[in-house]
Image (cartoon, rainbow, N blue to C red):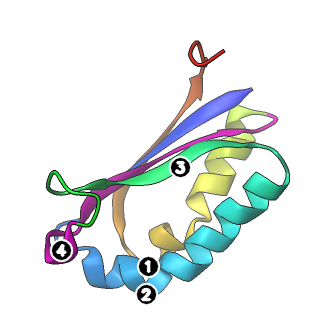
């Protein structure tokens, strides 16, 4: 089943986010290689693909996991969690309707 993982950043997370980004992307690349990643990306703090010093306010990942427990375990092990980037992470089952 698909699950949405929504991380909300702490204020002024940019430095910690940049430091943890390579390890964060490595995990996402592994999901992609396994054919389990639907989409992933950050939420810019301003209306720009490259927000510069404004940074980001969070991230969204939609991926396939065997269970909610597995999705939560995966999300809790994210380098952004360990680096203190996220103040909270919500994991929920997700039903993709479009594109089909």
User: Distance between the Cα atoms at labels 1 and 3?
Assistant: 19 Å
For the point 20% across and 75% down, the residue is 52
Q: Residues within 10 Å of mark 1 (few under 14, many from 20)?
A: some
Q: Which residues are magenta?
A: 51-66
Question: Residue beneath label 3, please?
Answer: 40
Question: Residue beneath label 1, please?
Answer: 83
N-term-proximal mark, 1 vs 3 = 3
- The local secondary structure at tag 1 comes to loop
N-term-proximal mark, 4 vs 1 = 4
**Quarter of the image containing the C terminus?**
top right
Residue 51 in the figure: left or right of residue 17: left
Q: Is label 4 in contact with label 1 (beta carbons under 8 Å)? A: no
Residue 5 in the figure: left or right of residue 43: right
Q: Quadrant of residue 6?
A: top left
User: Distance between the Cα atoms at labels 1 and 2?
Assistant: 8 Å
Question: Residue beneath label 4, please?
Answer: 12
- The local secondary structure at tag 3 comes to strand
Residue 14 in the figure: left or right of residue 18: left
Q: Position of residue 2 (x, y in %)?
A: 68, 29
Q: Is residue 95 above or below residue 74?
A: above
Question: Residue beneath label 2, please?
Answer: 19
């Amino acid at each position: 089943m698909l699950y949405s993982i929504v991380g909300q950043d702490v204020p002024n997370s940019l430095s910690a986010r940049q430091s943890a980004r390579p390890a964060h992307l490595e995990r996402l690349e592994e999901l992609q290689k396994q054919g389990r990643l639907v989409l992933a990306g950050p939420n810019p703090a301003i209306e720009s693909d490259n927000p510069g010093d404004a940074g980001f306010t969070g991230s969204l990942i939609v991926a396939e996991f065997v269970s909610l427990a597995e999705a939560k375990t995966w999300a809790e092990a994210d380098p952004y969690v360990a680096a203190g980037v996220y103040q909270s992470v919500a994991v929920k089952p997700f039903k993709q309707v479009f594109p089909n």
